[in-house]
Image (tube, helix red, strand yellow):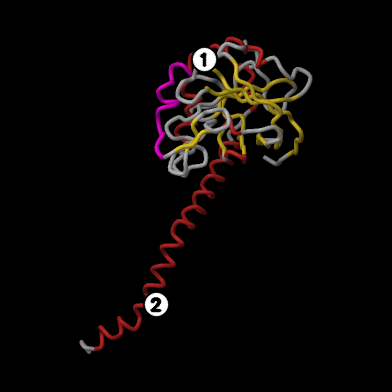
Amino acid sequence: MKGKIPAIIRKRLPMILVVIGILLIAYPIVGQIYARYQEEKMLEEWLNSIDVSDFEDFADADPEESLARLQETFEAEDGGDGSAGTGGSGNTGSDGEQQAGDGGTGAGGNAGQKSSASDLSNQKVLGIIQIPKIKVKDPIVEGVEASNLKAGIGHIPGTPLPGEPGNCALAGHRNYALKKLFRRLDELESGDEVIIITKTETLRYAVTEKVVVEPDEVSVLLRGSDKSIISMITCTPMYVHSHRLVVFADLVERVPREP
């Protein structure tokens, strides 16, 4: 009997190796499927937490004062906004900014972290922003304080809500503690799609323009008074933060959704 055991193992060894190989291949795939499931579950939790009445207190805020507060937040977070998570080789984008390479932690990398439940526990969530081209899917929260921009993309108080007439201004870091956020915002071009999902509808926008302005340039908030647009604001250049990159997009479609 003892002499037969090695023979049985040798006979079954190829099958054992095949099974091990299949498990090794399947493990990351199953992990990705589970991660997508968790992401969609969290997305629904974000959307179900939305209460429009929560934002009534912010409607009368002065957008210029809010923009000034945003600049203070950006300046205070300079170290975390650009210096964290810069691993991996990079290349240079069209505007001369360094992009995250395959091993980095930009929006295309696997090391990026999604907003967690703890980040959002004290936040007022407006919706979800998705930018397929640069692989962004993050919550939009009310406010531009440091805690807001750590949790996701901040809505500048005093500007219209997504889908309302006027310019809905949104702000995000280029890279905060390895999260994706607006790191690759400079890659967007005219016609690129931006999607905002609220509790009641899905809003589709098309990029129309991107500009670089001084940090205190309030004119970026004054566009679109007769139509619904969004302006997405972040720091530029990467790691310097002396100016602001602003990407504008027009609302092109709105589709009702069931809460």
- Asked if 195 appears above or below 34 in the picture, the reply is above
Amino acid beneath label 1: Gln
In the picture, the quarter occupied by the N terminus is bottom left
Element type at marker 2?
helix
Q: Which residues are magenta?
A: 74-88
Residue 249's place in the image compared with 166, above or below, is below
Q: Residue at x 46, y 54 (%)?
A: 31
| 58 is higher (above) or lower (below) than 39 | above
Name the residue carrying label 2: 15
Residue 228's spot in the image, x, y percent?
74, 25
Q: Secondary structure at mark 1?
A: helix
- In this rendering, would 1 be left or right of 176? left
Which quadrant of the figure contains the C terminus?
Answer: top right
Q: Position of residue 125 (x, y in %)?
A: 57, 29
Any mark on residue 71, and which? Answer: 1
Residue shown at 41% from the left, 34% from the top: 86
Rate crowding at label 2 as few (under 14), some (14 to 19) or many (20 or more) other CA atoms within 10 Å: few
Q: Observer-nearest residue: 28 or 243?
A: 243
* 2 or 1: tag closer to the N-terminus: 2
- Quick check: 224 left or right of 30? right
Label 1 Cα crowd, 10 Å radius (few <14 / some 14-19 / many 20+)? some
